[in-house]
Amino acid sequence: MKIIQLATNLNVGDAIGNEMLAIHRALTGAGYDCRIMALTIHPQLARMASAVDFSAIQPEDLVIFHKMNGDAFTERVAALDAKKVVLYHNITPGKFFLAYDSVMAWNLWRGRRQLKRLAGHVDYGWGDSEYNCRELAQAGFPRERLSVLPILFEPDRTTVPPDGAVAARLAKAPGTKLLFIGRIAPNKRQEDVIKVYCRFLQTVDSRATLYLVGSWTGFEKYYAKLKGFAADLGLSDEQVVFTGLVSEAEKAAYLHGADAFVCMSEHEGFGVPLVEAMRVGLPVAAYASSAVPETLGDNGLLFGEKRWDEIAGKLGQLCRDAGFRAGVLERQRQQLARFEGDGTRQRLLALVERAIADGGTKA
């Protein structure tokens, strides 16, 4: 019996790719024979995975299918004679992308249609969050066969020393340093982060800098819109800094060097950067959309509405009131305990044991 993780892509530095590798290490460490199959594999991970080969999957095997977009093999998975689990990382609604990439929007809509096709043809559904499990239920998966499996973090493997050059540059920058990490994409709503920053400049700290960390590859039209939006507000490239794709060490430098993390995203299936910020003791102010409240918890900086004055004011309180900041960070530490330690690993092992033992009714 083998446990086979199946996905469209396996990439270096990608949140889902990191989770696949963490699951692989956890399961092999528990004695299971594990494989990873993907359509595209980053060259650095060539030894960790192989091309998708359905003929190598046997009826006694357990397949963990990572679903996060439209793909070429959902129908094959549905028809596969093996025990099967869908691990759902959420599929961003295509409406966010229609104005910038109609092909991507179509593929995301396709992925959501495929999710409904999988209902009734797999044994279990797992979601990174309860939010994701609710979407599985809405797609037709029986609620009793759904379970939450948060992202599996490995602090020893994912903690890297901050890049010295980036750290030095941030240390020299005057004023408050606001940060958002995430690909430059319409659902992330970086324009709303810029709005918060603009109000923060006007009411709290005129020397503040905003760092928007993430690649815009594939979303050049949206990136151009953001650049133009910032310019129309009179903001310079030194005030709103777009970093592009960064290394793990550079990302660590931004996380350690910032004063606050600001997230105005309108769709997150989990929100890995939120947890990364909490891990380094960086307070997070966020819009309460999708799975964000579940991931972040009630830290005192979660906003149900995008009222720029209110958000900027709370950020100002965070910078000026040591007691308020300490309270925010303490609540974040309590929330972080949900994702760190051995709890998620043990939950993974328990869910795998259940899936192997129970042939049950298909989800």
Image (tube, rainbow, N blue to C red):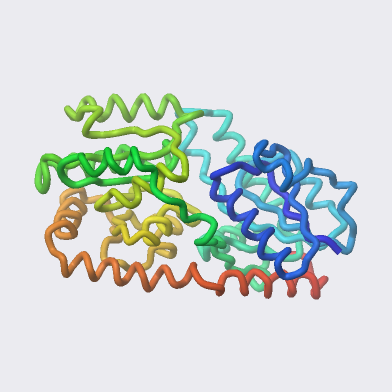
Kindly identify the residue that appears in the image at 64 percent across and 54 percent down.
Answer: 21
Q: Is residue 22 depicted above or below 238 in this figure?
A: below
Quadrant of the image containing the N terminus: bottom right
**Camera-side residue of 335 and 304:** 335
Q: Position of residue 85 (x, y in %)?
A: 72, 61
Q: Horizontal placement of 204 versus 343: left or right?
A: left
Quadrant of the image containing the C terminus: bottom right
Kindly identify the residue that appears in the image at 77 percent across and 54 percent down.
Answer: 35
Q: Is residue 273 depicted above or below 155 in this figure?
A: above
Looking at the rendered structure, the number of numbered marks drawn on it comes to: 0
Q: Where is residue 111, by image quadrant?
A: top right
Q: Where is residue 207, by image quadrant?
A: top left
Q: Position of residue 156 (x, y in %)?
A: 52, 61
**Camera-side residue of 211 and 301:** 211
Q: Horizontal placement of 281 versus 325: left or right?
A: right
Residue 58 appears anywhere in the view? yes
Q: Is residue 111 depicted above or below 335 in this figure?
A: above
Q: Position of residue 139 (x, y in %)?
A: 63, 56
Kindly identify the residue that appears in the image at 29 percent across and 66 percent down.
Answer: 329
Residue 185 appears anywhere in the view? no
Q: Position of residue 189 (x, y in %)?
A: 36, 41
Q: Horizontal placement of 279 versus 147: left or right?
A: left
